Image (tube, rainbow, N blue to C red):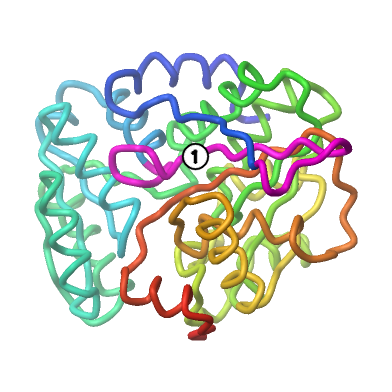
Amino acid sequence: MPILVNDLYAARKNIAGIAVRTPLVPAWSMSNDERDVRLKLEITQPIGAFKLRGAANALANLSAEQSRKGVVCVSTGNHGRAVAYAAHRLGIPAYICMSKLVPENKVEAIESVGGNVKIGGSSQDEAQQEVNRLVREQGMTEVSPFDHFDVVAGQGTIGIELVEDNPELDTVIVPLSGGGLIAGVALAVKTLVPGVRLIGLSMEKGAAMYESIRKGLPVEVEEHTSLADSLGGGIGLDNRYTFSMVRDLVDDIRTVPELYIAEAMRYLYRHEGWIAEGAGAIGLVPLLYDLDLALGRNIVVVVSGKNIDMDLFARVMGGEVPY
């Protein structure tokens, strides 16, 4: 492995005081005498998503000169909020580059936690050009959302907490996008509790890591609108860390339709009382629908984020499947 479990323990020290240790709570409505289901509530992070762990670790490992010049990233949501929040706490200048198409509420959310938003272009690719310019001309450091040593190590602190809080766990279900989250979690639990099964869940259309693993190398995919929009985007054709880690550590990867994602969101709210975005709730799908997966007795579902437009959330709660 390019990243070792000791790197995860170092990350835990780095992020203390910025990211919080999140609760692992029983899912009473899904548990019975044969199965214990628990929810890892990353929705309780200060920014409402797990991304804060990786961002905080990456920023904590900057040199003094890098910290002085600042950091930059491209984002449409949780990663930008995480970088902005962690940078503000550490006194580091942070610029989040976004396209003109990003809704104003997302811009305001990043600005509210101390980020400097730079709007440019009408696509993520064009916003990335501004990132490249700031790196080239001002010497800023780019913080990647997933394929980054420190980011993966930061996300892996979730896995350490899982084992400490539930050493009997045998199955962990994790949302899967670029792989930073599941790679870090898998490294932790597979090292500390060998034999645990890791299952990754993505949306049915535009699942880049799923397609890349299936084809044996990183590939590009067409992006589609989804309730699990946080799981969209590519993994990078020059992927350095997450592709190989997901390939070697994750036992099963599945994609699920929008109908299942919507039902998982509804179930989580109505039966367990938690609000989650589609990507955050997707891990419940194997417990609600038969996906022909081998699930154990002690199951943990990582609920990764809650940052959804509340009008959209209300529509889903009303029975709509928007996409």
Magenta range is 28-51
Residue beneath the point at 16% across and 21% down: 64
Residue beneath the point at 24% across and 69% down: 127
Which x, y percent locates residue 287? 75, 55
Which x, y percent locates residue 35? 82, 39
Instruction: Judge from the rendering whether residue 280 lies leftward or rightward of residue 182; answer left or right.
Output: left
Instruction: Judge from the rendering whether residue 154 lies leftward or rightward of residue 96; answer left or right.
Output: right
Residue beneath the point at 68% across and 35% down: 186
**Image: 167 above or below 88:** above
**Rendered image quadrant of residue 182:** top right
Instruction: Judge from the rendering whether residue 295 lies leftward or rightward of residue 85; answer left or right.
Output: right
Quadrant containing the N terminus in the rendered view: top right
Foreground pick, 110 / 151: 110
Which x, y percent locates residue 150? 43, 31
Which x, y percent locates residue 136? 19, 52
Residue beneath the point at 63% across and 78% down: 259
Foreground pick, 311 / 308: 311
Kindly state the secondary structure of the residue where label 1 is placed.
strand
CA neighbours of label 1 inside 10 A, class few (<14), some (14 to 19), many (20+) = many
Asked if residue 199 is among those painted magenta in the image, a careful observer would answer no
Foreground pick, 264 / 45: 264
Instruction: Judge from the rendering whether residue 204 lies leftward or rightward of residue 86; answer left or right.
Output: right
Asked if residue 35 is among those painted magenta in the image, a careful observer would answer yes
**Rendered image quadrant of residue 98:** bottom left
Residue on which the image places disc 1: 41
**Kind of residue at disc 1:** Leu
